[in-house]
Amino acid sequence: MRRFPGDSWRLGRQPDGTVQDRDNFLEASAENILFGGGEASLTPADIEISQNHFFKPLIWMKGQPGYVGGTNGNPFIVKNLLELKNAQRLLLDGNIMEYSWVPDRWLWHPDNAY
C-alpha cells in the first residue's frame, strides 16, 4: 500500500509478528518513523523498512523561499527522518532520506548496533 502526505497512520504488526513498511512516501514534521521512546514491555522486532521516500519540505525551514510556519508563524518542529530508541532485527534497505536539516539528527552509532 502506498501512503502520501496527509495520510495519518501507524505501522501495524503482521500476523507473524513482523513489522513491514514498504513503498511509501513519508512526510512528517517530527519523526517520520519512530520505534520506542516510552516504557515498553516488548521490543519491536523483525522490522523491514524498504523502498520508502522519507521527506521534509524545505518550505518548513525558516529562511527558505516560500517558508510557511505553523499557525503562530514559528517553524514546524522538525526532527528525525527515522528514529530507533528500542528495536531489534531491523532491515533498512533502498530508502531515500531527503531534507533533514536539523544538525545531529541523522546519527548512526555502530557500537550500539548488533
Image (cartoon, helix red, strand yellow):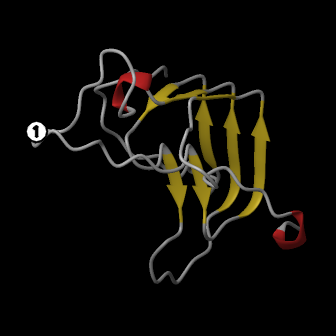
Q: Is residue 76 above or below residue 25?
A: below
Q: Position of residue 33 (x, y in %)?
A: 51, 47
Residue at 52% x, 84% y: name it.
41
Residue furthest toward the front? 63
Q: Is residue 3 above or below residue 43?
A: above
Total labels drawn: 1
**108 or 49: which is nearer to us?**
108
Q: Position of residue 11 (x, y in %)?
A: 47, 46
Residue furthest toward the top? 66
Q: Which structural element holds mark 1?
A: loop
Label 1 crowd (10 A; few <14 / some 14-19 / many >=20): few
**34 or 45: which is nearer to us?**
34
Q: Position of residue 18 (x, y in %)?
A: 65, 52
- Where, quadrant-wise, is the C terminus in this rendering? bottom right
**88 or 65: which is nearer to us?**
65
Which residue position is annotated with label 1?
A: 71
Residue at 39% x, 21% y: name it.
4
Residue at 77% x, 27% y: name it.
94
Q: Is residue 68 above or below residue 11?
A: above
Q: Is 111 left, or right, of 19 in this rendering?
A: right
Q: Given the image, on which type of amino acid does mark 1 rest?
A: Thr
The part of the image, by quadrant, that contains residue 63 is top left
Residue at 30% x, 37% y: name it.
8
Q: Is 80 left, or right, of 51 in this rendering?
A: left
